[in-house]
């Protein structure tokens, strides 16, 4: 009986913080594409600030801030690629302009993704592979969240957030109510198979009834489970980084949740997978 209060002791704090976070995200979504894009960039700054300390505990403040600000190189590279010295073809050659824009966008994207990772190679004296791998995932995830809003409006972001939230919430409650064998005890000692499977089931049902409206329900369910699983793996990866350096949270910025990486690890992983699949689909169909 003594264990029961501790299992739920953080619930009220977590709920209040979650409500506040939902309100902030809702305001950013309602404000339009420019504000949402800037909001995504700001959150990325914070996640990179936390990631720097997980890669190299005790990192100096100046280096940490420089690494935190390095994601701004991505939009700068895209802007330079699109508008820097772009020759406009003569009238009637719209296809040439589209090809030029597509080529420059691809080059800017590649350079913009590489530069923040190279910054870690220069400024970090430890954890460089973690910075490169996890940092790339965060960048791709943030990019897709911006793309989803611009391409599909608010619903494009909400659907992804709901899939991750369903998986996380059901995993939280099923893990505490049912318990049972641990999913990967050496990396994430609190995560159970019951919670993991509950998250898959909830995501599958959501995908079946919601995503299935755009195609076959089975494909919608499979897509939702895949995104939920990616989110769970993102959570485990962040847990492994914290265990590596012996910390409980990536920071203490969000009461009851730890840091931004602690709260958004699943979302950025699921978003990164969605971005990779979207890019692969565009290449496949072009």
Image: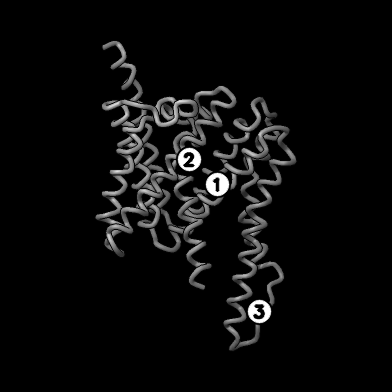
- Mark 2 or mark 3, which is nearer to you? 2
Tell me if label 1 and label 2 are in contact, CB under 8 Å.
yes
The residues bearing labels 2 and 3 have C-alpha atoms spaced at a distance of: 42 Å
Is disc 2 in contact with disc 3, using a CB cutoff of under 8 Å? Answer: no
Image height of 138 relative to 248, above or below: below
Secondary structure at numbered mark 3: loop
Residue that label 3 marks: 88
> Is residue 204 shown above or below 174?
below
Q: Position of residue 106 (x, y in %)?
A: 62, 64
In this view, 265 is above or below 282: above
Q: Residue 64: x, y in percent?
A: 66, 34
Q: Is residue 3 visible?
A: yes
The residue to which callout 1 is attached is 137
Is residue 37 toward the left or the right of residue 75 in the image?
Answer: left
At x 73%, y 33%, the residue is 125
Q: Picture coordinates of residue 164 (x, y %)?
A: 38, 44
Q: Dot 1, how many residues are within 10 Å of its Cα: few (below 14), some (14-19), or many (20+)? A: many
Residue 214 in the image, given as x and y percentages of width and height: 30, 64
Task: Identify the residue at horizontal 30%, vertical 64% (top origin).
Answer: 215
Location of residue 170 (image quadrant): top left
């Amino acid at each position: 009986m003594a264990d029961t209060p501790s299992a739920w002791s953080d619930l009220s704090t977590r709920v209040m913080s979650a409500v506040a976070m939902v309100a902030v995200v809702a305001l950013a979504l309602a404000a339009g594409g420019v504000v949402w894009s800037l909001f995504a960039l700001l959150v990325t700054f914070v996640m990179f600030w936390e990631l720097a300390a997980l890669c190299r505990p005790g990192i100096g403040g100046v280096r940490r801030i420089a690494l935190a600000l390095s994601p701004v190189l991505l939009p700068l590279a895209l802007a330079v690629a699109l508008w820097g010295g772009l020759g406009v073809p003569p009238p009637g050659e719209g296809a040439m302009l589209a090809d030029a824009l597509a080529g420059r966008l691809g080059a800017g994207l590649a350079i913009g993704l590489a530069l923040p990772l190279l910054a870690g190679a220069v400024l970090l004296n430890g954890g460089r592979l973690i910075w490169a791998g996890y940092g790339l995932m965060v960048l791709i995830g943030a990019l897709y969240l911006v793309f989803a809003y611009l391409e599909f409006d608010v619903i494009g972001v909400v659907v992804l957030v709901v899939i991750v939230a369903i998986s996380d919430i059901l995993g939280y409650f099923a893990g505490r109510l049912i318990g049972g064998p641990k999913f990967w005890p050496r990396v994430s000692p609190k995560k159970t198979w019951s919670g993991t499977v509950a998250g898959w089931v909830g995501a599958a049902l959501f995908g079946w009834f919601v995503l299935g409206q755009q195609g076959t329900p089975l494909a919608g369910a499979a897509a939702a489970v895949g995104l939920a699983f990616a989110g769970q793996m993102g959570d485990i990866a962040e847990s492994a980084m914290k265990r590596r350096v012996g910390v409980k949270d990536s920071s203490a910025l969000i009461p009851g949740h730890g840091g931004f990486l602690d709260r958004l690890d699943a979302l950025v992983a699921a978003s990164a997978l969605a971005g990779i699949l979207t890019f692969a689909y565009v290449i496949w169909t072009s």
